[in-house]
Amino acid sequence: MDIARLLSPMPSDADAHAVVLRSRTPVPTATSVLKRKPASGQLVPTAPPAPKRKRKSRLSAKQIQVSRENQQDQSLLLNLTLDVNDLKQQVHDCLARKSMHETRSLLRRERLCGAVLRATERFFRLFRTGHRAWEPHEAAFFAATLDDQLVINSVVSGVDVFFEQWRRYKKLLRQRYFRIDTTRVLVSESDSCVVECKGEFEGRLTHEAVQTLFPHILADRDLLARVVDCRLVCPTRTLIYFDASGRIVQYDAHADIFEGLNRILVSNPVDVITLMARARISAEGSMIPDGEGDSGSNGGGDFRIDSTTDVVCTNRFAGEADQAAREFD
């Protein structure tokens, strides 16, 4: 046991610090960098290298121009994007207003259609047996429903002419009934409406009616006897035009008298042509003349029966009637 070493005094903290300072290995500082010497391999502190200052680069004229163009493009793109978004909002608003307008128009059309159908039903209910003396409330209905400038069959106009035609039908043809079988709306707009009514008219061919409508057969006693006082049933088609207020502005009534006479004469084409060749019925198909030799603007020579077959006869059928009669004989 090394007693001498044990008995030797311990070094103090200062001596220990001195020993450290006397060490051959240098202690690096915060601002020093350890660098190994190539010969001895020892690490020695050295000063850190000074930071290199980067030289500011300057853009060329072309680069500056390109940068400015890019900025302009970005600004233009932003403005266009804002414009597109604004247009999209305007389109959305327009579509919303269009939808509201269509909804309102649809509601107006529905209300107008309902009103005109009710008016049409009451109108023909009042005329189901022809013209007659009207009650005050019925006269008030006609005054509220019929326009003062009512157009009849696209030729004449006036409420007085309208009622006069109904009086002539009642007087000459002894109208028994006027029935409507089908009613439908042909055209429906927010400011107008057209209603089509199909039905049947029944009356009798009185001697006065033959004198007014078919005066050329008065000398033919056989044909006259076959048609006078016969039951006349004619298909009818009526177009009624209403305005936005629900008033009737045009009334086009077409009676297929050709079909009615064809039933009376048992489908004898020769007699039908002979009867209709010089009939004094207006070209519009259902206007009865006043019985004084004037059949209106159409004259007394030709007539037209508007129906589903749209049969048209004129005075030129007189020669054809004679030829058909000779062939029949």
Image (cartoon, helix red, strand yellow):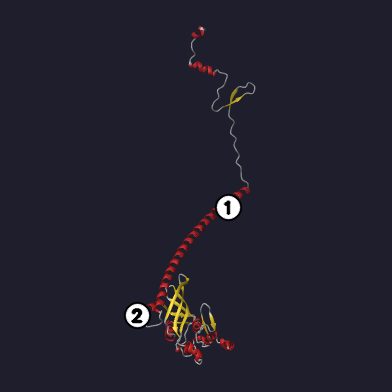
* Residue 77 position (above or below residue 27): below
Element type where label 1 sits in the image: helix
Q: Residue at x 59, y 23 (%)?
A: 43
Residue at image mark 2:
136
* Residue 133 position (above or below residue 6): below
Element type where label 2 sits in the image: helix
Return the x and y of residue 203 as percentages of the image width and height: 44, 83
Q: Is residue 62 left or right of residue 230?
A: right
Return the x and y of residue 141 as percentages of the image width and height: 38, 77
Quadrant in which residue 131 is drawn: bottom left
- Seen from the viewer's position, the closer of residues 221 and 57 is 221
Position of the C terminus, as image quadrant, is bottom right
- Identified by mark 1, the residue type is Asp
Q: Residue furthest left?
A: 136
Q: Residues within 10 Å of mark 2 (few under 14, many from 20)?
A: few
Spatial CA distance of label 2 from label 1 is: 81 Å
Return the x and y of residue 122 as percentages of the image width and height: 40, 75
Q: Residues within 10 Å of mark 1 (few under 14, many from 20)?
A: few
Q: Nearer the viewer, mark 2 or mark 1?
A: 2
Q: Residue furthest bottom?
A: 219
Quadrant in which residue 106 is drawn: bottom left
How many numbered marks are there?
2
* Residue 65 position (above or below residue 275): above
Q: Residue furthest right?
A: 39
Cβ atoms under marks 2 and 1 closer than 8 Å: no
- Identified by mark 2, the residue type is Pro
- Seen from the viewer's position, the closer of residues 310 and 73 is 310
Q: Residue furthest front?
A: 329
The mark found on residue 73 in the picture is: 1
Return the x and y of residue 246 as percentages of the image width and height: 42, 73
